[in-house]
Amino acid sequence: MPGASYFVLGVLFVEAMCPVEITVLAVLILSFGDPFAGLAGIYFKNSPLIYKGKTIAGTGACALISCVITMLFYLYVP
């Protein structure tokens, strides 16, 4: 299955199980966190691998951008 299929399945699952605010936050984190993780993994090629091609730099970048998005979401969304 292509990556977009997992994205759609994840969005549908979260939408069915959670309130709208959580769904929007989950989509934002997934939409920005995954590309930033990929870019960091490519940019820092020599970063140690933690699991099947996943680097520590990519994981850290995803965690950082996810925290920033969450903070901005809760600051600006009533």
Image: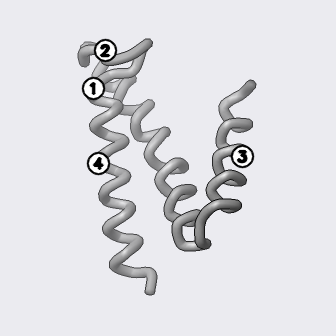
Q: Where is residue 22 in the image (x, y as percent from the top left)?
A: 52, 66
Q: Which residue is drawn at 71% across and 44% down?
A: 9
Question: Mark 1 is on which residue type?
Answer: Ile
Q: Name the residue under label 1.
A: 56
Quadrant of image for the N terminus: top right
Quadrant of image for the C terminus: bottom left
* Marks 4,2: beta carbons within 8 A: no
* Marks 1,2: beta carbons within 8 A: yes
Between the residue at mark 1 and the residue at mark 4, the CA separation in whole angstroms equals 12 Å
Between the residue at mark 3 and the residue at mark 2, the CA separation in whole angstroms equals 28 Å
Q: Name the residue under label 4.
A: 64
Q: Position of residue 38 (x, y in %)?
A: 44, 31
| Closer to the eye: label 3 or 4 | 3
- Earlier in the chain: of badge 3 and badge 1, it is 3
Q: Name the residue under label 2.
A: 49
Give the camera-side residue of 46 and 72. 72
Question: Mark 1: few, some, or many residues within 10 Å (few <14, many ≥20)?
Answer: some
Question: Mark 3 is on which residue type?
Answer: Val
